[in-house]
Image (cartoon, rainbow, N blue to C red):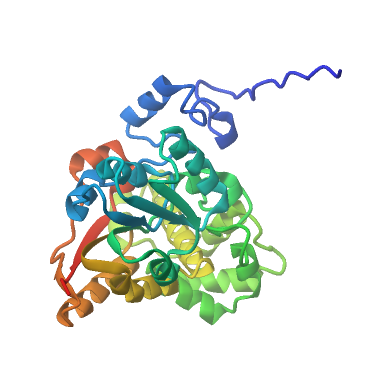
Amino acid sequence: MEEKQHKRRIHYSGKYPRRFEEKYKELNPEKYGDEIAHVIAKGNTPAGMHIPIMVNEILDVLAIKPGERGFDATLGYGGHTCAMLEKLAGKGHLISGDIDPIESKKTEARIRAKGFGEDIWELRNMNFCQIDELAREVGPFDFILADLGVSSMQIDNPERGFTYKSEGPLDLRLNPEAGITAADRLRDIDEYELEGLLQENADEPYATEIARYIVKTRRRRPIRTTKDLHEAIGQALAKVKLPREMAERAGYSTKKQALARAELIKKSSARVFQALRIDINREYEVLYEFMEKLPAALAPGGRAAILTFHSGEDRIVKKAFKIFHQQGVYADIAQDVIRPTKEECYRNSRAHSTKLRWAIKGEE
C-alpha cells in the first residue's frame, strides 16, 4: 500500500496572508471560528465567505409565517436562505435558486449540515428569470427575495476574474460553464459598442478614452487577465485631466498628484469590471425579465423584496414596481428605498451601496 505523501501548508511572507489561496484559516470557517470572528469584527469579509446584507430589514418586509412557500432567487452563500428557513420554523417550504454551479454546491452542503432537509428546503440550479416556469411547477409564492449583488466568494476568488485587485483570468461569468468570457468579449467588440457599454452599465466618465485605447492596442497587447485590463485602463487614463476636486486636493505636489491619478484609475477599473460583468451575464436583460414575471409568481398578498447595488439595477426595479402598482397589480410598494444602518456598513463595507425595495401583491 502506497504511503500518502504529506502536503505542506502554503507559506506566505509577512504577518498576514495576502493571496486568496494562502488564507487557509479564513477558507475553513468550521475549523477556525475564532479567526473568522476576528476578521468580521474588524469590518472585513473573510476570504471565501459572504456576509448577508440587511437580514433584519428583509425579514421585516417579507413577514414570513410558518407554513408559507418562498423563493430565494439568488442563493449565494446562503445567509438569507438560512434566516428565512428559521422563520418558517420547520413548516412550509423554501426553494433557493442560483446559476453558479461551483458555489451553490458548497452552500448546499453547509445548509444540509445545519439540518435542513428536502422536506423544508430545495436547491435549484437556475437563472432567476425562469421564475415563471418554477411557479407553474410548484405554485405561486408567499414571499420572494432577490439579492442582485455578486457574492464575496466570487469576488475574492482570483480564478473567477471579478476584480482588478487580484490577478487571474479575465472571466467574469456567474456561471463559468456557459457563455463567453470577458476576455473573449474584449477581443471582438468594436470601439463604439464598448464605449456605449461602459457608459450604460457603469456611468464611466472616461468611457471614450478607455474604449479607444483597448481597441487600438489589443492586437499587440491582448487583454487576457484582470491585470492586463487594469493596466490598459491605467494607460488609457495616464494623461487625462484630473477632476477639479482631485486636482485641488493634490495641489502642486507630484506625490499627491500621482496618488490622485492612482485613485482615479482604481475607480474606473471598478466601474469597467462592473460594466463588463453586467454585459457578459446579461444582467439587465435578466432583471427586466424577472421583474415582468414577478407578479404572476406571487400568491395574492405575496411579498417581494429586492436588494440592488447600483443605480442601473435600482432604476429597473423602481420603475417595474411603480408601473405594476399603478395598474393595481401591487397593493403597496416601497415609496423610498431602505438603506443599511451605519453600524452594518461599518461591520460590512460591501453594504454601503445597497438599496432595498419591496412590493405586496394585491388580494384577488
Q: Position of residue 294 (x, y in %)?
A: 32, 70
Q: Is residue 297 left or right of residue 198?
A: left
Q: Please identify the quadrant where the N terminus is shown.
A: top right
Answer whether residue 262 is visible to the viewer in this image.
no
Q: Is residue 26 left or right of residue 42?
A: right
Q: Position of residue 280 (x, y in %)?
A: 54, 67
Indicate whether 33 appears above or below 152. above
Q: Is residue 292 left or right of residue 270?
A: left
Answer whether residue 352 is visible to the viewer in this image.
yes
Of residues 213 and 198, which is closer to you in this image? 198
Q: Which image quarter: residue 22?
A: top right
Q: Position of residue 209 (x, y in %)?
A: 49, 71
Of residues 7 and 211, which is closer to you in this image? 7
Q: Which image quarter: residue 329?
A: bottom left
Q: Please identify the quadrant where the C terminus is shown.
A: bottom left
Of residues 130 and 32, which is closer to you in this image? 130
Residue found at x 27% / y 45%: 88
Of residues 67 and 94, which is closer to you in this image? 67
Residue found at x 65% / y 75%: 188
Q: Position of residue 245 (x, y in %)?
A: 28, 58
Indicate whether 270 appears above or below 313. above
Indicate whether 169 appears above or below 240. above
Residue found at x 21% / y 49%: 65
